[in-house]
Amino acid sequence: MDTFDPSRRQVLKGSAAAMAAGAMTSLGALYSRQALAASDPTRLAPVPSRYGPLAPALDQSTGLPLLQLPRGFSYRSFGWTGDRMRDGQPCPDRHDGMAVVGVRHPRHGAGHGHGHGRGYELVLIRNHERGGAAPIQAPGMYDRGDIGGGQRAGGGTTTLTWRNGEWRDIEPSLGGTLVNCAGGPTPWGTWLSCEEIKTDAVSSAGKKHGYVFEVHPEAERTSGRPLVGLGRFSHEAVAVDPRTGIVYLTEDDRNKAGLYRFIPNDRRGRYGSLENGGRLQAARVRGRRNADLTVAAIGDEYALEWIDIPDPDLDTIAAPAGFPDVTAGETLSGPFAQAWSEGALRMSRGEGIWHSHGKLFIVDTSTGVDARGRKGYGNGAVWVLDLATQRLRALFVSGHQLAAHNPDNVTVSPRGGVLLCEDGGESPDEYGPGARLIGLTRRGESFWFCKNNVALTSSQIADAGKLIPEGDYRESEFCGACWDPLGHTLFVNIQTPGITFAITGPWGRGPL
């Protein structure tokens, strides 16, 4: 069996020191751009990509034209819905958040039937945003009960490995959870998987949902225990400040979404340390009660302070009369209701969050106003929180679907390049329909890097040995984008029909 060695992850990080230094400079230039606020409050169109125009590219695993990419880039697919995993189970569907969590050094002769090979093996953990469905039978099982109508909790995670430019293995790691959307990696080499569900329901096994779970890179060590202290709400993503160990969390609940952080009691930073409790807090704009961030302009800036949430596990509360921009009868998550009563800010729909060089890149997928004038129904924005100063600034705001159509997950490359996963439907442009991967330049301008091109006939699917239904899946979102520690390979998912990709190419040609 392969062994996990967190120190090897640090070796790879250390060898990327030169890139990191360059990234610091690039991020500083990106973050400091303020002049746009007066003249250009939103971005209405992308800029030309330095990587060049997009064109259909053939998958090196199946020969199918699944992605549109710039010249010189190639990719391999893996872990399709229905593919057999190591234990014989079919791979679950609805791929979502993902990260490279560590590096293993395979013992001589290991490799699960794929040959000996040499070099480091990357370990990725991938979410599956499934509701009621056949459970993923995994080492870490949370809820085996009936969640209503004879349904079982079908969400969870799978663990993938990549070595020497090839996919190696896939196995289940977490099961019995619900709607595992995004999450985030920890500095100590685990994955925090988030349930994106707001409910007071209790299963027949006495389990509630809406929690965060820690997944170990060695699947058999995953406990399946919820991290109750991180709150029960419609979680989207998390990011950990490696300097302090504080965990930052987003909430996806339209126009009643808070921004949170968890200060752990146990700062040792190891698997299970977050189970030892801590304080959950929500962000409040200094000097401004219940600040509204559902509409933004490039350059908007706020000083944040943090307020304690007494009961992170509180049930939902009916939205009070006069609560803005929601319909009658809607509820607030228990944590958000407590935060709001103390003047906390609100976002539209907090989605991706990623740490890079002392800053958090935070996506609000629907910042803005739609054609009907509804707040919180726009095309989205990217905020940057400087952890040293606790100042939050709007880096990018999309004023049109061409610039970005509801970005969701976000990642930052070792070179400092910001990449957004689009979740806005078909997003038609000069390359046709298809969701996009969108990069940001050092000036905070967007450009198109990749398009979903998955439209397959039954014969194409059969020839590739896959089990998905035929169809046009180009509207399906990208999610789970992440780089290996050296920035050679970009890993990303398309949620439906459920495919994971490893993309390589001349990254130095552009800002990613």
Image: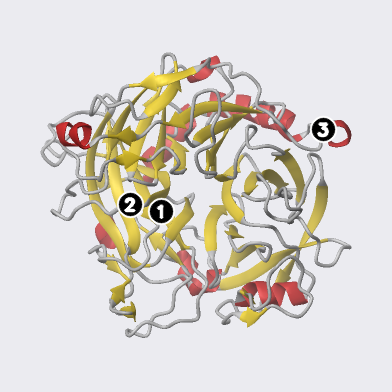
Task: Pick the residue in front: 148 or 241.
Answer: 148
Q: Nearer the viewer, residue 444 or 385?
A: 444
Q: Which residue is mark 3?
A: 40
Residue at the disc numbered 1: 190
Residue at the image point whose x is 49% and y is 58% from the top: 269
Q: Secondary structure at mark 1?
A: loop
Vertical placement of residue 356 versus 342, above or below? above
Q: Measure the alpha-carbon separation of dots 2 and 3.
A: 44 Å
* Tags 2 and 3 touching, CB below 8 Å: no
Residue located 58% across and 60% down the image: 252
- The residue beneath circle 2 is 217
x then y, percent, for residue 457: 25, 35
User: Three-letter amino acid code at disc 2?
Assistant: Pro
- Quadrant in the rendering for residue 37: top right
- Residue 290 lies, in percent from the top left, at 80, 66
Give how far apart the Cα atoms at labels 3 and 1 are. Answer: 40 Å
Residue type at mark 1: give it: Thr
Secondary structure found at label 2: loop
Pinpoint residue 53: horizontal percent, then vertical percent: 51, 16
Q: Amino acid at mark 3?
A: Asp
* Left/right of residue 364 with respect to residue 171 in the rendered view: right
